[in-house]
Image (cartoon, rainbow, N blue to C red):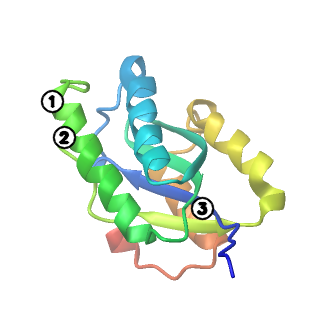
Amino acid sequence: MSTYTQILFQIVFSTKNRERTLKVEKRVELHKFIWGILKNKNCHLYQIGGIEDHIHIVTHIHPSIALSAIIKDIKVASSEYIKKENLFTNFNGWQDGYAAFTYSLKEKDRLIEYVKNQEKHHETLSFYEEYKQLLVEQQIEFDEKYLR
């Protein structure tokens, strides 16, 4: 029997200490690099976006790959790439943790639009507020001291 999955993930993580180092001019280059990592692991990227201090990835992960493994691969490889290419001045790496949420396929279009519109979304909402809101919406218990 074959393996079939349809698990839509939204993965969110920030720069270390939420430093605002991911400048808009080079963000597309970073997104293309991350897309390449996912493609090489047989994952399907639906959308990638973010602003200066964090990133959102909407993807389907191949069933042979653990969520934590793909996130580690993305963080390690993209950090090396950013430093090697001097993509973002003062980039000091990614935060240690991450958030990952699953969604129904029916929510795919709404989720893609949400990630596409990160710049506009964050005109009125900080990453901290957004992150907390996502955790509450997903009914995830958390300690506020670990969110800052």
- 82 relative position to 45: left or right: left
Q: Earlier in the sequence, mark 3 or mark 1?
A: 3
Secondary structure at badge 3 equals: strand
What residue is rendered at 47% in x and 65% in y?
Answer: 99
- The label shown at residue 84 is 1
Secondary structure at badge 1 equals: helix
| Any part of residue 17 in sight | no
Residue 44 % position (x, y): 59, 50
State the residue in front, 147 or 83. Answer: 83
Could you tell me how far apart the alpha carbons at marks 3 and 1 are, in whole angstroms? 29 Å
Residue 107 % position (x, y): 79, 57
Task: Tell me the crowding category of disc 1: few under 14, some 14 to 19, or many 20 or more residues within 10 angstroms, Cα based.
Answer: few
- Residue farthest top in this picture: 25
Could you tell me how far apart the alpha carbons at marks 3 and 2 are, in whole angstroms? 24 Å
Task: Tell me the crowding category of disc 3: few under 14, some 14 to 19, or many 20 or more residues within 10 angstroms, Cα based.
Answer: many
Quadrant for the C terminus in the image: bottom left
What residue is rendered at 69% in x and 72% in y?
Answer: 4
Kindly indicate whether the residue at mark 1 contacts the one at mark 3 (C-beta within 8 angstroms).
no
What residue is rendered at 40% in x and 25% in y?
Answer: 29
Image quadrant where residue 95 sits: bottom left
Image quadrant where residue 9 sits: bottom right
* Kind of residue at disc 2: Glu
Kindly indicate whether the residue at mark 1 contacts the one at mark 2 (C-beta within 8 angstroms).
yes
Q: Earlier in the sequence, mark 3 or mark 2?
A: 3
| Any part of residue 74 in sight | yes
* Kind of residue at disc 1: Lys
Could you tell me how far apart the alpha carbons at marks 2 and 1 are, in whole angstroms? 6 Å
- The label shown at residue 80 is 2
State the residue in front, 21 or 66. Answer: 66
- Residue farthest front in this picture: 1
The residue pinned by badge 3 equals 9
